[in-house]
Amino acid sequence: NNSMDYRMLAAFGLSFVISVILYKIFIPILRKVKLGQKILEIGPAWHKCKEGTPVLGGLFFIAPMIVVVVIFLFSENLGENDYGLLAVFGMALAFGLIGFIDDYVKLFKKRNKGLSATQKLVLQFLVAAVYLWINSSYCGKDSSLYLPIGDRSIDLGVFYYFAAIIVIVYMVNCSNLTDGIDGLLGTISVIIGIFFFLISFMMPENNSGILTASLVGALIGFLIFNLHPAKIIMGDTGALYLGGFLVGMAFYFNMEVLIFIIMFVWLIEGVSDILQVGYYKLTKKRIFKMAPIHHHFEMCGWSEFKIVTVFSVITAFMCGAAYFIYIM
């Protein structure tokens, strides 16, 4: 209906405008107070020039989305479908908060590593578990896995929850790994956001369209300042938030089976990291010149622009494949 289309357009426009204004205001402030990125010694040598680029950029695409949710979702009577959306948004914010704590520790406590891996994982597993509990208790979601091919479901019982927690935490961390070069995670997330926006048109209620339109608008605002050479970096705050939000949307649309197709690039980034570490521990040799895999291509002489372009085209292709599988 027309009023819905206007609301989606308004959500997109509002998020875009707010994010651009916030970046315009805060990039100079963050530069002035020297809240810049520290480049790890293990990173590529040519990333040294990025030292001092302001971090915490994720905050300024999360903030417009909060505004949109308050204006558009809380201004009406919420249905059960909306509870599912709010659960996704809540999970994304919780992951973003973990990322923010991590960034905060790096910036203010001057510990380059941030939170320990164990601390992060415990918090992440907790967030994923709470999300799944809310989903099953209040949002009418059960333990059945929807199979788009053949349009049927299989009930996995308690195994569903174990598998779902691992998938959520793994993919959210893969999102974080993907955020290694200017514009990469932002561009891929815009493409996945557009994919979910298109899927929302198949749903009887369309508030999912408002939320995804808002994400795309806010991220395009971010990318104006984040494409190479980046004036601001999203940090773990933004990377974990995006992971939580987009993985959550896949669960919302019963697309758990398709997550690895939709987020194929994230999956490969994570797998390349695991293979590299595991293989090196066993053999003291490396499979890739550097992991995760976008750094391998950098070492092969690809420009950041080329990597972002190729990985984005792959993402668009995989989202197209997922779309056809879903509507078959």
Image (cartoon, rainbow, N blue to C red):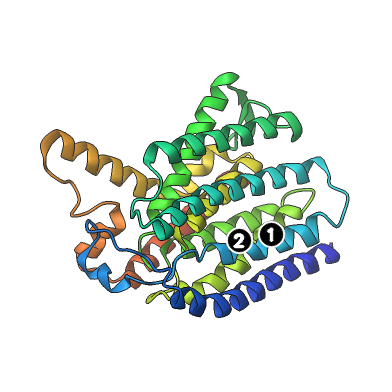
Residue drawn at the location 35% of the way across and 53% of the way down: 111
Residue 66 circle label: 1
Residue 278, relative to residue 209: is it above or below?
above
| Residue 197: percent from left, percent from top | 65, 58
- The numbered mark at residue 11 is none
Three-letter amino acid code of the residue under disc 1:
Ile
Residue 273: x and y in percent read: 29, 45
Q: Quadrant of the C terminus?
A: top right
User: Which residue is under mark 2?
Assistant: 62
Residues packed near mark 2 inside 10 Å, few (<14), some (14 to 19) or many (20 plus): many
Amino acid type of the residue that numbered disc 2 sits on in the rendered structure: Ile
Q: Please name whichever residue, 99 or 318, is drawn nearer the observer in this view of the structure.
A: 99
With 324 as the anchor, is 201 left or right in this view? right
Q: Is residue 328 above or below residue 8?
A: above
Quarter occupied by residue 252: top right
Residue 136 figure quarter: top right
Give x and y (percent) for residue 67.
Answer: 72, 63
Q: Do labels 1 and 2 touch, CB within 8 Å?
A: yes
SS of the residue under disc 2: helix
